[in-house]
C-alpha cells in the first residue's frame, strides 16, 4: 500500500516538520490546522482521512487535543475551526507560509532557495 502524503512535496513536508520542531508545536496539529484554514475553516472526516497519511485513531486523537484547546469543534460530519482559532493560529500559519515562500522559489518548484 502506497503511503499517502499531505498534498505537498517532500521538501515542503520536511519544512513543516522543521518548523514544528523549531517552534515546539505538534507537526500533525500544524498540518491539520493549516488544511482547515485552506479549506475555509471546515473539513469532513472523509476529506481529512484522505488528506492526512495517518491512521484514523491518530487523527481523531489529534483533533481531540485541538478540541480541548478550543481550536476546533467536531461533529459526526467533520471538523471546524473555532473563532478563537482564527486569532490563535493565524499568526503561526502566516509565519510558516512566509518562511516557506522565502525558502522555495515558487509554489511549483520544490527546490529550496538557499539565498532566502
Image: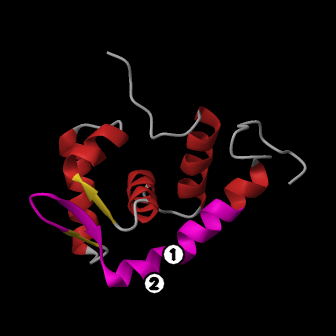
Secondary structure of the residue carrying tag 1 is helix
Instruction: In the displayed orientation, state which residue is furthest to the right.
Output: 115
Q: Position of residue 1 (x, y in %)?
A: 31, 15
Q: Are marks 1 and 2 in contact (CB under 8 Å)?
A: yes
Q: Dot 2: few (<14), some (14–19), or many (≥20) neighbours within 10 Å?
A: few
Up-down relation of residue 81 to residue 76 (above or below):
below
* Residue projecting furthest to the left: 76
In the rendering, at what x and y percent does residue 67 appear? 23, 70
**The quarter of the displayed image where residue 114 is located:** top right
Crowdedness near tag 1: few (<14), some (14–19) or many (≥20) residues, C-alpha within 10 Å: some
State how the image is colored.
Answer: secondary structure
The tag on residue 109 is none
- Report which residue position mark 1 lands on: 90
Residue 92 placement: quadrant: bottom right
Q: Is residue 57 left or right of residue 87?
A: left
Residue wearing tag 2? 87
Residue range of the region highlighted in magenta in the rendering: 74-98
31 inside magenta stretch: no
* Quadrant in the rendering for residue 57: top left
Of 77 and 85, which appears nearest the observer? 77
Q: Secondary structure at mark 2?
A: helix
Task: Name the residue: 25% across, 59% down.
Answer: 63
Instruction: From the image, give the main secondary structure of the stretch colored magenta.
Output: helix
The answer for how far apart the CA atoms under marks 1 and 2 are is 6 Å
Residue drawn at point x = 90 percent, y = 49 percent: 115
- x 68%, y 54%: residue: 100
Amino acid at each position: 500500500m502506497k503511503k499517502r502524503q499531505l498534498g505537498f512535496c517532500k521538501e515542503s513536508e520536511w519544512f513543516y516538520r522543521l518548523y514544528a520542531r523549531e517552534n515546539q508545536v505538534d507537526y500533525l496539529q500544524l498540518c491539520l490546522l493549516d488544511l482547515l484554514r485552506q479549506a475555509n475553516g471546515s473539513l469532513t472526516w472523509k476529506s481529512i482521512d484522505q488528506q492526512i497519511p495517518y491512521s484514523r485513531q491518530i487523527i481523531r486523537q489529534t483533533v481531540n487535543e485541538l478540541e480541548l484547546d478550543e481550536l476546533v469543534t467536531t461533529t459526526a460530519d467533520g471538523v471546524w475551526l473555532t473563532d478563537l482559532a482564527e486569532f490563535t493560529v493565524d499568526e503561526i500559519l502566516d509565519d510558516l507560509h512566509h518562511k516557506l515562500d522565502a525558502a522555495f522559489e515558487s509554489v511549483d518548484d520544490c527546490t529550496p532557495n538557499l539565498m532566502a
